[in-house]
Image: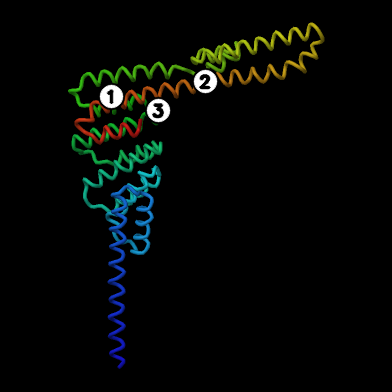
Amino acid sequence: MKLKIYFILIIKVCFCFDGAAQGLHQTYAYANELLRLEQFEPALHTYHRVLFFGEGAYQETIYQQMGNCYFELGEYDQAARYFDLAYFKEDNDSIRTELTFKKTFSLLLDKNFTYAQMELFNLPDSLSTYFAQKRDFYSGITYFGLEEFSDSEQFFLGAIPEREKDARYRLEAIFDQLEKVEKINPNKARILSMFIPGLGQIYAGDWGAGINSFILNGGLIALGVHTAVQFTLFDAAITILPWYQRFYMGGYMGAEKAAFDKIASKRGEIYRDVLEVIEETKKKEQPALGNLSKSLN
């Protein structure tokens, strides 16, 4: 009788384990189907269930799939984390290289340029032409984000084939414009507006704000003089001076901000122009780089 009971228990336990394994496999397949249907959030939740209940099962593939979900949801820091986990679970060197690029791409979109640079340094020296040009393209973006524009230009040029002479000339001309932008000095704009209100804004290219600041501060000075003549210097000091001080300080601080905004705006325009050149030369030969250009634009 005891042997019969033990036999029944063993059979039940075996069925339980088999059912659990089958259920886990079905859950994993369901998550993959959700991913295929671009239902990224429910797919991600389902993948997490597989990891939790499967005690590490499917890690060889599931980390990359979870990274793809996080990436599509715009959670680039999490995407980079899971691509990194997938990298250490992968044995194939080619796939590991692709995972490195995926992680780097996520870090670039997260504007984490320093860590993106570290990932690129970890790539092997011997890469195929495709991977080498892709590395140069990513490096160009990384150095641009780090404001190391000379290095950025060289890497972007490396991402364009030598035969594309016109594209290379255009890229060099774009970076020549960047040299003019870098000559704008926010500190100089602030000092100019300290001497003549509005002059710093004009130097930064904001003529409207510069003229407005000049007229406003000039009007307050004239009003202060008139008040001092008609009444007393003390009356002018307590009624006009606080307002003048407020607008005067706001003027030269605004001039400095206008210069920073001008630099940022021009850099953004130049960056978009660079990506357009890269996209035009790569969209036929290497569609992946063309798609990346659109994402980073």
Viewer-proximal residue among 32 and 135:
32
Q: Are marks 3 and 2 in contact (CB under 8 Å)?
A: no
The answer to whether residue 67 of the structure is visible from this angle is no
The answer to whether residue 254 of the structure is visible from this angle is yes
Q: Is residue 55 above or below residue 159?
A: below
Q: Amino acid at mark 1?
A: Val
Q: Amino acid at mark 2?
A: Ala
> Which mark sits nearer the N-terminus, 3 or 2?
3
Q: Residue 116, image x and y in percent?
A: 35, 38
Residue that extends furthest to the bottom in the rendered view of this protein: 1
Dot 1 corresponds to which residue? Answer: 277
Q: Residue 240, image x and y in percent?
A: 73, 15
Choose top left, top right, bottom left or bottom right for residue 216: top right
Dot 2 corresponds to which residue? Answer: 258
**For mark 1, does the 10 Å Cα neighbourhood hold few (<14), some (14 to 19), or many (20 or more) residues?**
many
Q: Is residue 120 left or right of residue 166?
A: right
Residue at 36% x, 17% y is 177
Viewer-proximal residue among 98 and 211:
211
- Viewer-side label of 3, 1: 1
Q: Amino acid at mark 3?
A: Glu
Choose top left, top right, bottom left or bottom right for residue 252: top right
Determine whether the residue tagged by mark 1 lies in a helix, strand or loop.
helix
Give the Cα separation between the discs numbered 3 and 1: 20 Å
- Viewer-side label of 3, 2: 2
Determine whether the residue tagged by mark 3 lies in a helix, strand or loop.
loop
Viewer-proximal residue among 185 and 274:
274
